Image: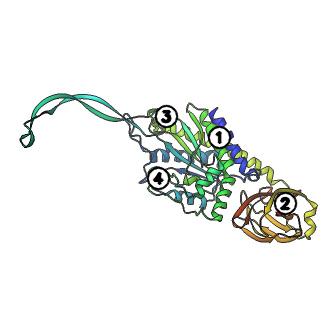
Amino acid sequence: MFKMNFVIKVLLASLFFAPAVFAQTPKKIKTIIVDAGHGGKDFGAHGGYEGGLNSYEKNVTLDISNKLVAELRKQLPDVKIVPTRTIDIYQSPPEKADIANENKGDLFICIHADAVNLQTGRRQVGSHQETRYHVKYTGKGKKKKKTSTPYTVTVPTYEYYKIGSQRSGTSIWLFAAHKTSEKLKAVMNNEDLQIESGTDSVYNDIDFDTPEGRIRAKIYADRYQKKSIKLATMVDEEVDKTDRTALGLNQRQKGIWVLQATNMPAILIETGFITNHDDERYLNSDKGQQELAECIARAVKRYKDDIDHTAAIAATAPKVPATNDTVEKYTERTKNILKRIDLKQSTFKVDLYDDGDIDGDIVSVYYNGKAVLSNKKLTDKPISLNLTADPDKTENELLIYAENEGDIPPNTALMIVTEGNTRTEVRIIADEKKNGVVLFTKK
């Protein structure tokens, strides 16, 4: 019940802020990145409790990742599988993200092992003799003297040890987005990112304090969150079919760099608790490692089959060809009024970006019936328009005409309207049947 409620809440939050993106059809899965968490000088979590195997997370993650790479290559022979590391080396989180992005991955799967802070226990292992003193004072004032008389007592001898945790099971983690506003607030305020325990730096090279940085953060969140949820849910379902405890989907208040900086859907799998007696043995066994690798591979195959099937249907859909017709061409389509914006001043700026996957969307823009932009391809960099409200009009109309629908229908754009210090975001959807329209009213 907890897992289902959580997923529903995440989906609702995601749909609240990005309906246009989720209407898009994903591309086929061609490249998958598998990351073994930690490595080299970064040991990660430690099974350092009494009765434990004294194992380290970096070794467990490497063994599971290597088995997962082999399993994915067996089940998905046509897909390129790229491991970030196959030996015990240190890579900073930005380096791992760079590997994923440079290889143009379609999925990023990060393997970790969980841990909790261990409690300390003590027990008596014997006794020993200890000298103590009776203190007596005689005389007064300057003649006051202190006399100490030694005596011997028998006291218990204790030893201290770490107690293994009771927490066990496999969980899947997503980039913090259970409440969109909180996620973006954390990202844009340069809040410290929890990267991986054992690393000694915080990495945040993106300046989210700029308008461009804010938009990039928003686009990232919109583009990949639902896809990540889909894959994470499938992994959790496959784990739940085994004897393992499936702990469901989770999100951290603070970001995880390798999930936030990879330009693709991404999940982090906490395969088990290295601080738990049974889990640690499971994670260190060939049987346990292979079972986890097969669970994850089955989930990835299900995800790929689903994505590829949807992409294949989209590929057969008719595309709207680019055209050089006259201005009146937009009148052949209906108008979909997406937002009305009240202006306090006459001049304002409009920035247009591709929303969702950067898939070759091309648009023309008409302002009050006149072309102000013709056959321009949208990217993650802004196309800027400086506009002025017509004082003789009650409403000023900005119309987006889809010249095509890109590789992934429909044509989607993110519009940022800036008027003085006020910024308004509008998601534009346009296709062969309707134009996206924003109306501006000068008060």
Which quarter of the picture shows residue 131? top left
Q: Secondary structure at mark 1?
A: helix
| Measured Cα–Cα span from mark 2 to mark 1 | 36 Å
Amino acid at pointer 3: Arg
Number of numbered discs overlaid on the protein picture: 4
Q: Secondary structure at mark 2?
A: strand
Q: Secondary structure at mark 3?
A: loop
Q: Earlier in the sequence, mark 2 or mark 4?
A: 4
| Measured Cα–Cα span from mark 4 to mark 1 | 29 Å
In the rendered structure, the answer to whether residue 5 lies left or right of residue 407 reads left
Tell me the tag on residue 437: 2
Q: Earlier in the sequence, mark 2 or mark 1?
A: 1
- The x, y position of residue 384, in whole percent, is 74, 70
Q: Earlier in the sequence, mark 2 or mark 3?
A: 3
Instruction: Work out whether residue 107 or residue 232 is closer to the camera in this orientation and state it.
Output: 232
Residue 298 in sight in this render: no
Amino acid at pointer 2: Val
Q: Which residue is mark 1?
A: 233
Q: Which residue is mark 4?
A: 87
| Measured Cα–Cα span from mark 2 to mark 3 | 53 Å
> Which dot, 2 or 4, sits closer to the camera?
2
Q: Residues within 10 Å of mark 2 (few under 14, many from 20)?
A: many
Disc 4 and disc 1 in contact, CB within 8 angstroms: no
In the rendered structure, the answer to whether residue 112 lies left or right of residue 433 reads left
